[in-house]
Image: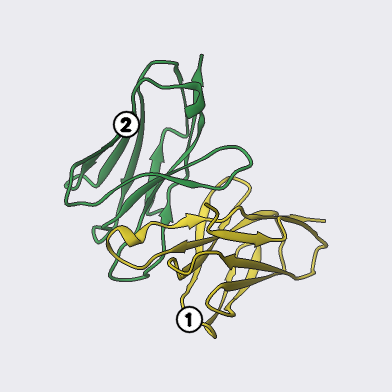
Amino acid sequence: VTLLEQNPRWRLVPRGQAVNLRCILKNSQYPWMSWYQQDLQKQLQWLFTLRSPGDKEVKSLPGADYLATRVTDTELRLQVANMSQGRTLYCTCSAGLGGHQDTQYFGPGTRLLVL
Amino acid sequence: QQQVRQSPQSLTVWEGETAILNCSYEDSTFDYFPWYWQFPRESPALLIAIRPVSNKKEDGRFTIFFNKREKKLSLHITDSQPGDSATYFCAASARNYNQGKLIFGQGTKLSIKP
């Protein structure tokens, strides 16, 4: 059963251009949504966890700047800017915090390549 | 600072042997340790997880051994199969702060030779 849908699945990004990613939650029983990046060396790194519509956060990491927004109960967005190296962005969801609810499920990912 | 470390970086074992993947951590407040596996061109998927109340968790051929005093874990895969070839990530989180944040190790690439 697919819990998360991500689009686009991949994108070529001209250097200096921003790109917008979407993640759609298919099962409302897993409302805690997060973004992770995976770099070209396969290292996974947490970016954000956003629970409520209207939540927004920004972060700058080596190689990219991020703006995350929880748009609705089922939609999470991520804007990626100033990307200098390719990476894959994963959306995750979990039922809650604590106990067996901690389990995070990964979406299919969006692969970004720099032109 | 790398808070979760994995070794070895890569491992090759013969089919039928036991593969042992190691993980260590620094933060004593971590209270949840999932292992994820990732196949080429796929997203990470939860394999098995453990909490510090236990020192062992078993699921079929996969077993986590946990040593809280030494802050170490290991994943044992018995009777290894070619289909187990993947990259394995050890992760950790602390419920009481940074909720929702999983900290991942660098991964161990496991290859099973038939």
Residue B83 falls left or right of residue B53 = right
Identify the image's colour scheme: rainbow, by chain, secondary structure or one colour.
by chain
Q: Which mark is residue B60?
A: 2
- The quadrant of the picture occupied by the C terminus of chain A is bottom right
- Quadrant in which residue B103 is drawn: bottom left
| Residues at marks 1 and 2, CA–CA distance in whole angstroms | 38 Å
- In the image, B22 versus A112, the foreground residue is A112
Q: Chain of mark 1?
A: A
Colour yellow maps to chain: A
B61 lies above or below A8? above
A7 lies above or below A58? above
Circle 1 residue: A52
The tint of chain B in the picture is green
Q: Position of residue B95 (x, y in %)?
A: 29, 66
Q: Is residue A26 visible?
A: yes
Residue drawn at x 44%, y 66% is A30
Which amino acid lies under the numbered mark 2 shown in the image of this protein?
A: Gly
In the picture as drawn, the residue positioned furthest to the bottom comes out as A54
Residue B55 falls left or right of residue B46 = left
**Badge 2 density bin: few <14, some 14–19, many ≥20, Cα 10 Å:** few
Q: Are marks 1 and 2 in contact (CB under 8 Å)?
A: no
Dot 1 and dot 2 within a common chain: no
Q: Position of residue B80 (x, y in %)?
A: 41, 22
Residue B72 falls left or right of residue A19 = left
Q: Position of residue B98 (x, y in %)?
A: 37, 70
Asked which secondary structure carries label 1, the reply is: loop
Q: Chain of mark 2?
A: B
- In the image, B76 versus A30, the foreground residue is A30
Residue drawn at x 55%, y 64% is A26
Asked which secondary structure carries label 2, the reply is: loop
Q: Is residue B1 visible?
A: no
